[in-house]
Image (cartoon, rainbow, N blue to C red):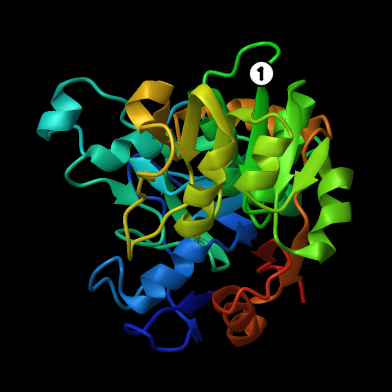
Amino acid sequence: MKAIVMTGANEPWQVREVATPAAEPGQVLVKVHASGMCYTDVWATQGAGGDIYPQTPGHEVVGEIVEVGAGVHGREVGDRVGTTWVQQACGRCDYCRRYRPLTGQTAMNCAAPRTTGFSAQGGHAEYIAIAAGGTVLLPDGLDYVDAAPMMCAGYTTWSGLRDAGLQPGEKVAVIGIGGLGHMALQLAKASGFETVAITHSPDKRDLAKELGADHVVADGEELAELGGVDVLLVTTNAFDAAEAAMAGLRPDGRVVLSGLDFTRPFSLSSEGVPFPMMRQRVIGSTHGGQQYLGEVLDFAAKGKVKPITETFTLDRATEAYDRLSTGKMRFRGVFTPHLA
């Protein structure tokens, strides 16, 4: 089969002919119809995931089951399925033996999880073997290209909104109107919350309104002038802008960190009213469990959230990586391995 391969830290992606995997016991073999690109693919290529080379990246994977391994129940040939970053936990480490969730992002606390595109082959390929328990069934009628970004970007932002514990009448702001944030705006609005977009980009202001923002502001100062918000959902790795936006967070407000920055920590300002007196909270949130993934897939199937995507064949891997790594990708890139 054809697959994109990372060959070493900071080395360009290569398209290679590699052996098609088989469905081992407990696994299913999936014909990949769409595989979304995440900035985590860039970090893996730069070496943040350790020495995992050679490896195929991609953890927003959807397709059709073409083979079922021994011992698999609940999955059949022909099923439309998807998988995410973490397919499976080891079941034996201290975390797992406390009966923590064994699938979903929470399993990243496992000592040896099966991670798509890291410890196991990723989805930027024509076929992928996946732990059957790490798959979810896709809703009927949901297009594969629209489904792929739900496996991480949609899953992450919806988990952030759920983890924030939003209450009726509260207001939410999204900072970082990119691959994650453009879906967060749609999800917040679809859930009935007054929604604010925070962006410095003039070209995103009108689009933010179209995606569901009731208001668009440039920074925390303008957010405060608007009356502030109860939840600040951070979907960017630009933590300096997110820290400044806290000027518009109300007392008892929550900052939800869904963006990742491996180069610096998130910091609390020492200016103004001391943080403890504001009774605010900082919540780390990525993938909250397959129940949240099921919910966001339902939103997508009903047309309440739709990713803005660019599609690429595998042969355009170099172009796709360049656009992703330089921030030129228009919200979400998706490989379509079986399209000419």
Is residue 250 shown above or below 26?
A: above
Residue 241 drawn at (x, y percent): 53, 56
Judging depth in this view, the residue of 117 and 39 nearest the camera is 39
Question: Residue at the location (67% across, 65% down)?
Answer: 333
Residue 267 drawn at (x, y percent): 35, 49
Left or right relative to 190: residue 59: left
Mark 1: few/some/many CA within 10 Å (<14, 14-19, 20+): some
Is residue 170 shown above or below 137?
A: above
Quickly name the residue at label 1: 170
Q: Secondary structure at mark 1?
A: loop
Question: Residue at the location (32% across, 26% down)?
Answer: 101
Would residue 84 be seen by someone viewing this image from the given angle?
yes
Judging depth in this view, the residue of 106 and 160 nearest the camera is 160
The image quadrant of residue 311 is: bottom right
Residue ranking furthest to the top = 168
Would residue 56 be seen by someone viewing this image from the given angle?
no
Question: Residue at the location (71% across, 28% down)?
Answer: 298
Judging depth in this view, the residue of 69 and 86 nearest the camera is 86
Q: Quadrant of the C terminus?
A: bottom right
Left or right relative to 190: residue 253: left
The image quadrant of residue 297 is: top right
Residue 182 drawn at (x, y percent): 72, 49
Residue 237 drawn at (x, y percent): 48, 58
Is residue 306 shown above or below 124?
A: above
Left or right relative to 9: residue 77: right
Counting the numbered discs, the total is: 1
